[in-house]
Amino acid sequence: LAEALAAPPEDGAPAGPGSVRVPAYPAAERAARALAHVARYAEWRRRAEERPGRVPEYEDIDEAGAAADIEVLLTAHGVAESGPGGPHAVTLSAADTQRLLARYGIAVLPALPAPDPDAAVAAAHRLGFPVALKPTAPHLRHRADLGGVRLDLGGEAELLRAYSELTELLGKPSETRLVVQSMAPRGVDTVVRAAIDPAAGAVLSFGLAGAPSLLLGDTAHCLVPATDRDAAELIRSVRTAPLLFGWRGAAPVDTGALEELLLRVSRLMDDHPEVVGADLEPVIVAQHGIHVLGASIRLAPPPPRGDPGPRSLPAY
């Protein structure tokens, strides 16, 4: 900044290497915004130098097993050539998604299809009461505003009554794709996503589920591979972060487990360029532990890499 405020070259002197120009702005407000960007960047550089962060290793990650699964899945689906999210990308089934995530130590809460009331009862007995009943059709998924989710169903009578209500409210079970799922502890609903950006490469994203991310765009992003410092900053940089840390006397949730989940998703994306998209929603962050209620993964042959990795600005 001191160099930028130094005296400019004499009038008429061409600007060349080593010469300094004074920035000029048409309004003081724009100059103030520019200085704010400089200050934020300097603070970011300072924190990165003081605590550069590291990409942690997890002994339970099965990278080779995941690579073998991905190769089999791409072959089985006949996927030949593709780009990130392109027309030839394939979205894995729930079972394949859960198996691939399990290779990276990420468990998805069990859910069983309920095409009819008898199947719902059988699924509930298999999973153990209490259970939740919810639709999984794409046009109904994550639509809490429709009231299409029934929680804490403690017995057959409650489950059958809820099944009848949802069928009347949302339509035929074949259209809504109802499932019975094990109940998770109460907590804060969050969203973890990862995708390939054509310019930046793999990007990890985080936000709170529902209106904060969908309506207000309150989502934070970082490049993959994420470090432990990146994960900690990611969950603290959204505007709704206070809800995770005990807002208005509420009990703080397990942000350490949430950071670990982010790092494991980052490792999956970094280890396997064939994973062009991963959506974990919702992820309930409770006082102790996290619970992934839904997940999807998209695969495609590795896209061309024109960028060797995360970018960094030069030091001046």
Image (cartoon, rainbow, N blue to C red):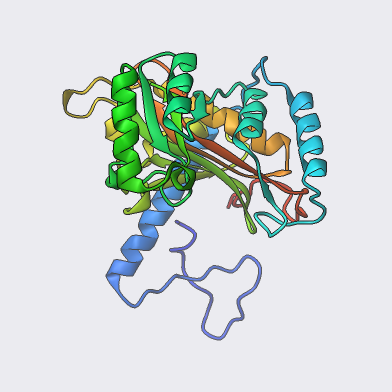
Nearer to me, 173 or 195: 173
Horizontal placement of 121 versus 100: left or right?
A: left
- Asked which quadrant contains residue 20, the reply is bottom right
Q: How many discs appear?
A: 0
Nearer to me, 277 or 230: 277
Which residue is at 39% across, 35% downward?
Answer: 134
In the rendered view, would you say 133 is above or below 80?
above
Residue 296's x, y, as percent?
57, 40
Q: Give the farthest residue toward the left.
A: 248
Horizontal placement of 304 versus 27: left or right?
A: right
Q: Is residue 187 visible?
A: no
Residue 9's x, y, as percent?
53, 75
- Asked which quadrant contains residue 124, the reply is top left
Horizontal placement of 229 versus 64: left or right?
A: left
In the picture, which quadrant includes the N terminus? Answer: bottom left
Q: Give the farthest residue toward the bottom.
A: 12
Which residue is at 49% across, 32% downward?
Answer: 231
Which residue is at 66% across, 33% downward?
Answer: 96
Horizontal placement of 198 versus 42: left or right?
A: right
Nearer to me, 252 or 152: 152
Nearer to me, 146 or 249: 146
Residue 240's x, y, as percent?
30, 40
Which residue is at 48% across, 41% downward?
Answer: 177
Residue 35's x, y, as percent?
37, 58
Q: Is residue 77 visible?
A: yes
